[in-house]
Image (spheres, helix red, strand yellow):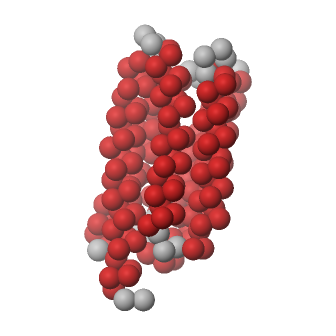
Amino acid sequence: MTTTETLQPTKNLRNLYLTRTAVQFLWAAATIATAATNPALAAALLVLYPLWDVACTLYDLKTSSDATSATTLYINAAAGILTAIGIGLTAYAHPQYAVAIFGAWALLAGLLQFVVGLIRRQRMGGQWAMILSGLQSTAAGVAFVVGGLNGKFHIKDLGGYAIFGAVYFLIAGILLSRKR
């Protein structure tokens, strides 16, 4: 593989990570700001979050030359679509269930991100932040499932989850920039 063939997927992934950083910070701010005053908007934002992840995953699949993680990414995209549907069906009537559904998705997506991070670490490096992010997402997912089902977590609490994810994406983007 030539240097150009190696650098383009790294550049694409870096750009994706940095874009995800910005969008996740904006999403978190909007969710935290609107959850108490406009629950309908917060619920809509909650539906959009996994769909944003699906769009990012599809972009990753399109621009990545990493066939070894493709199955994992397809599973992640399918899970995100199912999650958005589940949240859409529950967010307005039973927001605690929407939080629990989001948590189940965060748990699965975290495990998948962990696997993709391990695979990519060997090929391109700069993935330790994604590996840690996957582990953190898995743990947060468990907390959201339990907390959502027990009425202890609210949609606004998911803003912190997005902020942590944004920081991990920022670190990974910087690491990939340095690698180039």
Image quarter hosting the C terminus: bottom left
Please tell me which residue is depicted at 63% across the width and 29% down the height of the picture: 87
| Quarter of the image where one finds residue 72 | bottom right
Query: Depth check: 148 or 83 in front?
Result: 83
Q: Is residue 104 above or below residue 154?
A: below
Does residue 172 appear anywhere in the picture? yes
Q: Is residue 176 left or right of residue 103?
A: left
Q: Is residue 81 above or below residue 112?
A: above
Please tell me which residue is depicted at 43% across the width and 73% down the height of the picture: 125
Does residue 157 appear anywhere in the picture? no
State the image coordinates of residue 167 (x, y, percent, origin top left). Answer: 38, 47
Q: Is residue 86 above or below residue 12?
A: above
Q: Is residue 6 left or right of residue 79?
A: left
State the image coordinates of residue 79 (x, y, percent, origin top left). Answer: 65, 46
Query: Depth check: 54 or 96 in front?
Result: 54
Please tell me which residue is depicted at 45% across the width and 33% down the height of the picture: 160
Image quarter hosting the N terminus: bottom left
Q: Is residue 107 above or below residue 30?
A: below
Q: Is residue 118 left or right of residue 12?
A: right
State the image coordinates of residue 57 (x, y, percent, origin top left). Answer: 51, 55
Query: Depth check: 34 or 55 in front?
Result: 55
